């Protein structure tokens, strides 16, 4: 018989419904679910060398067909997980929700650090050495965005609600809420530094993509912040090494600059919102000569704070004493 294989991220229960439909129209066909775990920017690498293979099947015959398809990966000892259909559907959203949880957790800790005089970057480093926790995704800042994490979490939230899993729903809602709150906290820092009056102020935003090494601006925290600041009356100029055109298509009323130096010229405040290497490599002394007011808000906790302060900048970041 035939085997139909689904790979998309879908609400749990979808595969079972499809299986019933398939039974009516093609009783000789079977259905399997094989979620993909492709990372943006690494799709080819992740397809050729996945870090695990998850197959949701209802028969040994279906599993055998998939093992035949993936025999080269199995020869490389890629972990193989056989699951039922609902579990296979849950793997991707559960993994994404866990990553989002780590990011929102460290952003919650950033608020505690600010309130207590602690430093979230040192805290993250210290807890990251614990092998049970690990240091990945423990960088406090303006939170996550992109076309997957926010969408997956909200879809998972809705499905958990439909299934009556109230605690899961509340938990996921809190992760989403902490994530959006991080963006507002940066805007609060901007207002504080500019005496709550943004009208006519020139603000430079470094970064438009939702993450470095990508031109993807879907649900970009950087652009969300830029739009809100512009709506409050500021003149916003955005620089990004790769994402200027996609950003311009989405938000044509903002100003864009292909060149970092010209973007910084005459700025009353600078926001670092996507952690590209090119921004880490900027010389704070040279940059200070270009701006009107040397105020840097590092929304990604990625710049060398001491170097910027030594160069005469007022330096602010989430989760550190400002």
Image (spheres, rainbow, N blue to C red):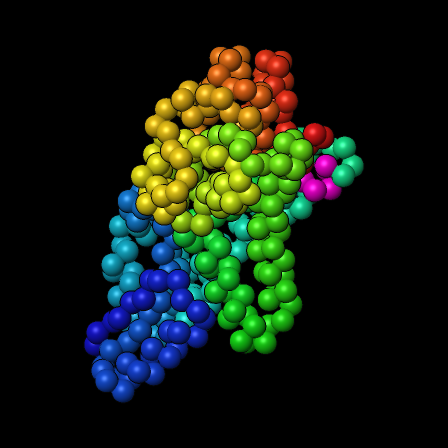
Quadrant where the N terminus sits is: bottom left
Instruction: Give x and y (percent) for residue 265.
Output: 46, 21
Instruction: Give x and y (percent) for residue 39.
Output: 38, 46
Instruction: Give x and y (percent) for residue 253.
Output: 39, 42
Tell me: residue 168, above or below residue 254: below
Q: Measuring 56% from the left and 72% from the top, which residue is drawn there?
A: 161
State left or right for residue 274 relative to residue 245.
right
State left or right for residue 205 relative to residue 46.
right
Magenta segment, which residues?
110-114
Residue 240 can be seen, yes or no? no
Tell me: residue 39, above or below residue 123: below
Residue 158 drawn in magenta: no
- Quarter of the figure with residue 55: bottom left
User: Residue pushed farthest right?
Assistant: 116
Q: Measuring 24% from the left and 78% from the top, which residue is drawn there?
A: 29
Looking at the rendered structure, the number of numbered marks drawn on it comes to 0
State left or right for residue 2 relative to residue 142.
left
Residue 36 can be seen, yes or no? yes
User: Residue pushed farthest front?
Assistant: 200
Instruction: Give x and y (percent) for residue 20.
Output: 34, 83
């Amino acid at each position: 018989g035939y085997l139909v294989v689904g790979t998309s991220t879908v609400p749990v229960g979808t595969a079972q419904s499809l299986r019933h439909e398939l039974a009516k129209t093609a009783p000789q066909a079977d259905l399997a679910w094989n979620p993909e775990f492709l990372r943006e920017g690494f799709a080819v690498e992740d397809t050729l060398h996945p870090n695990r293979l998850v197959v949701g099947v209802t028969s040994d015959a279906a599993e055998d067909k998939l093992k035949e398809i993936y025999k080269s990966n199995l020869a490389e000892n890629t972990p193989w997980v056989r699951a039922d259909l609902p579990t296979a559907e849950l793997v991707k959203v559960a993994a994404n929700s866990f990553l989002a949880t780590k990011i929102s957790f460290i952003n919650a800790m950033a608020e505690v650090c600010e309130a207590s005089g602690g430093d979230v970057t040192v805290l993250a480093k210290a807890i990251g050495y614990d092998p049970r926790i690990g240091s990945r995704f423990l960088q406090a800042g303006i939170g996550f965005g992109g076309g997957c994490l926010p969408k997956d979490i909200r879809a998972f939230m809705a499905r958990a609600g439909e299934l009556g899993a109230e605690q899961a729903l509340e938990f996921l809602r809190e992760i989403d809420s902490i994530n959006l709150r991080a963006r507002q906290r940066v805007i609060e820092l901007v207002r504080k530094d500019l005496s709550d009056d943004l009208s006519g102020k020139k603000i430079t935003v470094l970064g438009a993509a939702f993450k470095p090494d990508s031109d993807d601006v879907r649900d970009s925290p950087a652009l969300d912040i830029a739009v809100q600041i512009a709506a409050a009356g500021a003149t916003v100029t955005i620089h990004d090494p790769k994402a200027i055109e996609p950003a311009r298509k989405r938000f044509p009323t903002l100003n864009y600059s292909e060149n970092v130096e010209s973007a910084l010229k005459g700025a009353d405040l600078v926001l670092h919102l996507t952690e590209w290497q090119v921004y880490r490599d900027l010389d704070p002394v040279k940059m200070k000569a270009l701006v009107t007011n040397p105020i840097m808000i590092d929304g990604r906790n990625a710049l060398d704070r001491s170097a910027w302060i030594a160069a005469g900048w007022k330096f602010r970041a989430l989760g550190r004493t400002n």
